[in-house]
Image (cartoon, coloured by chain):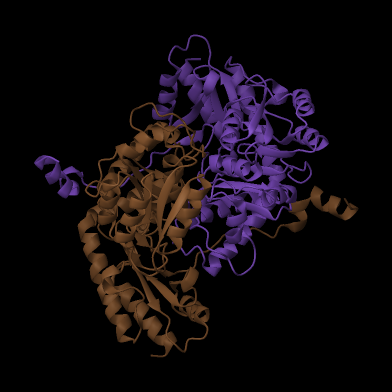
Chain colours: A purple, B brown
Amino acid sequence: MTQQQNQFMSTPAAEAAPAPVSFVAPRRTLMGPGPSDVHPRVLAAMAQPTIGHLDPAFVGLMDTIKQQLRRVFRTQNELTMPVSGPGSVGMEACFVNILEPGDTIVVCENGVFGGRMKQVAQRCGAKVVAVDDPWGRAIDPAKVDAALTQHPDAKALAFVHAETSTGALSDAATLAEIARKHGVLTIVDAVTSLGGVPLEVDAWQLDAVYSGTQKCLSAPPGLSPVTFSARAVEVAKQRKTPVQSWFMDINLVTGYWSGGAKRAYHHTAPVNALYGLHEALCLVEEEGLENAWARHRRVHEQLVAGLEGLGLKMLVPAAERIPQLNAVMIPDGVSDEAALRSRLLTEFGLEIGAGLGEFAGKVWRIGLMGQSCTEAHVQRCLDALKSVLGR
Amino acid sequence: MTQQQNQFMSTPAAEAAPAPVSFVAPRRTLMGPGPSDVHPRVLAAMAQPTIGHLDPAFVGLMDTIKQQLRRVFRTQNELTMPVSGPGSVGMEACFVNILEPGDTIVVCENGVFGGRMKQVAQRCGAKVVAVDDPWGRAIDPAKVDAALTQHPDAKALAFVHAETSTGALSDAATLAEIARKHGVLTIVDAVTSLGGVPLEVDAWQLDAVYSGTQKCLSAPPGLSPVTFSARAVEVAKQRKTPVQSWFMDINLVTGYWSGGAKRAYHHTAPVNALYGLHEALCLVEEEGLENAWARHRRVHEQLVAGLEGLGLKMLVPAAERIPQLNAVMIPDGVSDEAALRSRLLTEFGLEIGAGLGEFAGKVWRIGLMGQSCTEAHVQRCLDALKSVLGR
């Protein structure tokens, strides 16, 4: 070690640190693929003083949140809770609990998140049978049926209900029915669908379902609501090998989240984030879940009419669209789409989403999620687009 | 399915949902093992409107936080960032990136969190060599040296710097020196030590270090600052097998957290939680890290003097104590210690921690972490204990 390094290491703070400056968040209108605009009541809830993760008042809140999540997932599943991490952790929690090395799983890929499912399943040591559909289209149930027929040893079928990367909505009820016919469990990505379109976990008999908080629930990102059917819980309990993730092992984490006065410490829950999720779920309940679904559909139609009025074309066929995630083709003549999005952000405070994967540079993704799904949002977006496109 | 069940499933919300009620957090003084009291500036920061996780303003904040974490960890490590999950995820992130199936690791256990390390390492398919020390005591460097001598094939040594379950502080500098002598990497739990006692990641040449936000940094729980040395990054890059966790794979997540204008989307960061962490780190920098260490030491001595003045005995020998986590023996004659803690909570709004593992029912854990480490906290705690113990 040189003398100079040694001096530096002994007083790094004094030499390197600029004066600390508080962060002031800019004002944005969030119409990308999430996060969506967060209601001031949710922000205020999160700013309440932190209390202990084993405080009886907090344990009561946990129970309330579980009940709220059951209602929004439309399920009676006992194992229904928010995982303490973003949607990707919820995804991984579903796969690592259900799959063991050597298991076969059929995974549908019609966008980025189906692709991620394949990677996660492979890292569980599973054999992945891919069912590919074109990006921007719904999953084809006939292909799924064929793949499950060809692979009678499959343990599960995994698919994305609402593909955030493309705006394509798949028929989860039909896909789950096919899975049941073949006797396999379903793992369902409901990150963008929950709260925005009908999702019926019990009526459709879905098995392991995960979502996120920052889409149609309009809570800040960082939590992943999940629900496991009794069948899925049983499969996780009967495993021959331990779940590869200690943190995500539902046999451990439910000791903390499950009912009863005696909660076993597992990890320290993100207390303030859960204050926020609770308040966001209160807002959903005040409106009524079915009213929220109807609002997403209605406002989506307004947006589509407006975009088409500007001469823009939607990526996804009308019957397969997710109301809350609208992929629109970037028009010919736009040479630098990133520059236009940058102008939307700086001149209008408006965030819309870029294309992902094979649609990077080809589409924009306009979110109408939760609190960002209002007629006023549509108008603001159309006005801003009109301006930057010069139409 | 019975007719009744069917009816219930068709309208679960209408039949089952009570009117939504906003949660009002009770006022607490947090003197348990974490979370600690959160400064109003941090709460206010978190209540700022959510912005996008790829917004240039947010990307700038991410860079600032990385710099702040480097200063508080006392490191120049490029890979220094907050993992989007609680400390247990930070722990698992260190193990899954470093270990491959069949690797040998020496894990020190002198409390709950060393035990958790063993479980996490086993779930990576590693062969675990345990070095056990009595709970409530520091790790014995001689035993570590012997274990590494006996297992020349070991890849890493894992230990807990400050054992939150017992209040015992181990000599991380010496343990790391032994590891280097044997040519193995170190994985270090700094959950409770960071910000409260000297921790010198570069000077001690630690390799994979994880912490939490809800201890001496006094930010809300839910994030886990981690730092990886260049050696550790290289080991993760040269792996023969993929990291078993997609979410925790540092080869993927650094695409989002690493510098440069082009950030690759990996997951949606917990935006508001990061507002809070940033502000909490500003508070640490305003005080000065070394001043914070001195405060924890000074206030700890006041607490110990006060507890001994009440006739209580500390669990850990004086030379091995963590200032910010004080395990005190529950005095003879207390038949229902949980009832006493419950009285502290309801009558005094004071949270202290229960014993864990073999110390359940035998000790209380009194935290003096971050914003909860003041003379006023000590006085409030001593007054309340005096009252409920009738001393």
In which quadrant is the C terminus of chain B drawn? Answer: bottom left
Q: Position of residue B44 (x, y in %)?
A: 39, 54
Seen from the viewer's position, the closer of residues B23 and B102 is B102
- Residue at 39% across, 32% down: B237
Query: Residue B172 appears in which quarter of the rendering?
Result: bottom left
Q: Determine whether A328 is above or below B132 in the image.
A: above
Tell me where residue A365 sits by quadrant: top right
Please tell me which residue lies in front, A319 or B174. Answer: B174
Quadrant of the image occupied by residue A290: top right
Closer to us: B333 or A188: B333
Give the answer, above or below, for where B355 lies relative to B196: below
Please count the marks in the image.
0
Residue A292 falls left or right of residue B138? right
Q: Position of residue B186 (x, y in %)?
A: 34, 48
In the picture, measured across the screen, residue A130 lies left or right of residue B119, that is: right
**Residue A292: image x %, image y %?**
67, 42
Picture coordinates of residue B206, whole percent (x, y): 29, 47
The reply to whether residue A363 is visible in this rendering is no
Find the residue positioned furthest to the left.
A3
Residue at the image position 27 percent from the left and 52 percent from the top: B178
